[in-house]
Amino acid sequence: MDTVTVLNGSTQASGKLRQVEGVAIYAGKKTEVINLANINANTATNNARQIYGRIVGLNIWEYDGGGLQLGIGGRGLNPSRVSNFNTRQNGYDISADALGYPESYYVPPTEALERIEIVRGAAGLQYGTQFGGLVNFQLKKGAPDKKYEVVSRQTAGSWGFFNTFNSVGGTVKKLNYYTFYQYKRGDNWRPNSHYDQHAAYLHLDYPLTSKLKITGEYSFMHYLAQQPGGLTDADFENDPSVSVRTRNWFKVNWNLINLSLDYTFNNHTKINMRNYALVAGRDALGILNYINRPDPGGERDMMSDDYKNIGSEIRLLHQYTMFKKQTSTFLIGTRLYKGLTKRFQGDADAGSGPKFEFEGIEPDGSGYDFPGNNFSVFSENIFQINDKWSITPGARFEYISTKADGYYYQQMRFVPNVKRFEKKENNRSFVFFGIGSSYKLLNGVEFYANISQNYRSVNFNDIRILNDNARVDSSLKDERGYTADLGVRGKIKDWLYYDMTAFYLKYKNRIGSVFTRDVDFMVYRLRKNVADSRNIGFESLIEADLLKAITYGRSPYKLSVYTNFSIIDARYYNSADASIQDKQVEFVPPVLFRTGISFGKKAYNFTWQYSYVGQQYSDATNAEFTPSAVDGLIPSYNVMDISVSYKWKWATIFGSINNVTNTKYFTRRADGYPGPGIIPSDKRGYFVTVQFKL
C-alpha cells in the first residue's frame, strides 16, 4: 500500500505525500497528510475541528456532535458531506454515487484510521474532475510483526455519549488481517437528538506469490438518528438548545466491498487493480415546512434513496531513466464505473417514531431511477530533468452518461395533483489537461506550481426535489473551470515544517443558491447557474517543535506549535443580475485561522487548540436575514478545545473538553434535513476515553 514521508519519522502530525506513492503520482501538487497517531484529539466523536486543524483553508460544518457525518470544503467550496472532493477509502470510492450524487453519508471511524490524505484540485487528472481534489481515508492494517494485537477503547461523555471501539489485527504466516467493531450512542445537547451507530470493517491481504498480492475489504455502517431540526434567528439568539421538531429522523445503511490485486513485474513496473461495489441507502423522515411555522401535524415527508454502484480502476506505473540517467515516472490508468440511484419522495407515517414507510400504493411526490455510466482514461508523467527539477504533464479523457427515468406529481391549487412522467439523458465526453512542476533547492526547500482543468456535473438533487425551502432551475448546466497553485514547502532540519500556497480557482456557470420570493411572496432558496466566479487566496501551515530547536534534539519533552492561516476572496462576476454581481460566493469565510500547542513526553500530552472562522453567507445575494432562516449571515466565531492523555504500559487515558469557553455559534443554514433553518453547533462538552492495547 502507499507510504508517506512525514518529517523525519513518527512524531510530526502533518506532512506531505512523496512524488510517487504506490501507483499514484503527486509531483508538483499541493498534498497534505494527517497522521492520526500523532494527534491528540477527540477521535471518538470524529471531531473534525480538532482532527483537520492542520489542513489549510477548510470550512467545516459542525452540526453533528456524534461525528456521524463529515462536512468539509476547501478553498471556498461547499462543505456539504464532502461533496466537492473525490472521497475515497484505501483508494476506492465511498460516496453515494460518484457521478450524480457525490455526497458521503459514510465516514470511517477516526479511531480506525492510520492517516488522512488530501490532494487539492490538481488531483482531478487521476481521481476524477472535482474542483476540490481528493480526500483519502487510509485505514490501519494488522501489525506486521505480531500474530495479534488487540485495542479496546471505551469513551463516555456529555449528554449520554458512549462509544466502544474494539479492534484486532496482526500477521499469521503471510496473511495480514485487521478488523474492528464500533458502537456509539448519545443524546446530544438539544432534545429530540438521540442516535445509535454501528460500524464494522474487515481487511485481509495475502501475497499469492512474490509478485502478486490480493487484498479484500468489507465495510459496514448503520445509524439511526433523531434530528431536532433547525431554528430561526430569533430562536437561536434566545435559546439555541431548544427544538421545534420532534418527528424528524434519519437512517443510513452502508455496505462497501473491495477486492484489489497488486502485481510487481520488476523493480521499475507495477500494476494495481481495484474492484469495488456499494450497496447502501439513506432515509430521511420528518417535517420540511418553514421552520418559522409550527409542525402542522399529520403525515410526514419522506425521502428514500437506494444506491447500487460498481467500479473498477486499473493503474500501471513504470519508472525509467532519461536526462543523464535521472529516474522519470510514467502512469496510465483507466476507470469503469456504473451507478444506480433509486430515489423516492412522498407522504409517510403520521406518527412520531422512525417508521420509514410511504403511505399509499406509491410515493405521492416522486419516484426516479438515476442510472449513470462513466469511462475514463488518465495519464501523467514525471519528467525528472535533473536531481532538483521535475515537470509533470497529464491528461484525462472522461465519458459520462447520466439518466433520469421516473415520475413526479405536479402540485395543483384547486384540483388533484397531476402525475407527470419524465425521462432525461445527458451524455458528454471531454479531455482535460494539467501540468505541474517542482524545484528542490538545498536545505529541503521545494517550490511547486500546477494548473489543472476541472469539471462538476449537475447532480441528482439538481434534477428533481420537492421542498418548499428549495427549488431548482430546470435549465441547469454543468460547471467547468480550473485550479492553479503556486507554493513553497519544506523543513528546517527536523524541527520545523512549512507549506505556503497562493491559489486561484475559476468557475464558469457556477451553481449556487439565490434568495428568492415566489408569487405568494414566500421565500425559498433557488439553485441555479448563478454566474462565473473566481476564488483567489493564500494559505499557510507552519508546525514546529520548539524544544527540539532550542535543545538541538536533546530534550525528552516535546513542545509543538502549529498555525494554520488562510485568506480567501471569492466573488461572482459576469452576472446579468445586479443583486449577484461582485457578491461574495456563499460558504466562503474570508479568514480562517487555527492554531494549537502540544506539550508532553511519550507518557503524557497536553494539547490546546483554537479556531477562528470569519463571517460568511449562505446564498449568492448575500442576504443578511430571511424569515425562514434558510438564508442569511453566518457570523464569525471562535472556539477553543483542550485534550490530555496519559499512557502507562498497556493502558492509556484520554480526556477532552470541547468548546471550552461555551461559545454560542452555528456553521450552517439548511434548506432541508437536518433543518431547515439554523443548525446550532455543540456547546461545551466533556469526554473521557480509556484504551487498552495488548
Image (tube, rainbow, N blue to C red):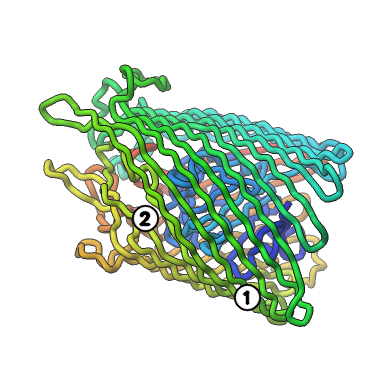
Q: Secondary structure at mark 2?
A: loop
Q: Is residue 358 left or right of residue 454?
A: left
Image point (47%, 65%), residue name: 453
- Kind of residue at disc 2: Asp
Q: Is residue 68 left or right of residue 322?
A: left
Q: Is residue 536 left or right of residue 33?
A: left
Q: Which residue is mark 2?
A: 478
Q: Is residue 150 left or right of residue 254?
A: right
* Classed neighbour count for the residue bearing mark 1: other residues with Cα under 10 Å, few (<14), some (14–19), many (≥20): many
The C terminus, quarter of image: top right
Q: Which residue is mark 1?
A: 391
**Residue at the outermost right position:** 173
Residue 693, x across and y down, in percent:
78, 38
Residue 550 in view in this figure: no
Q: Secondary structure at mark 1?
A: strand
Q: Nearer the viewer, residue 550 or 169?
A: 169
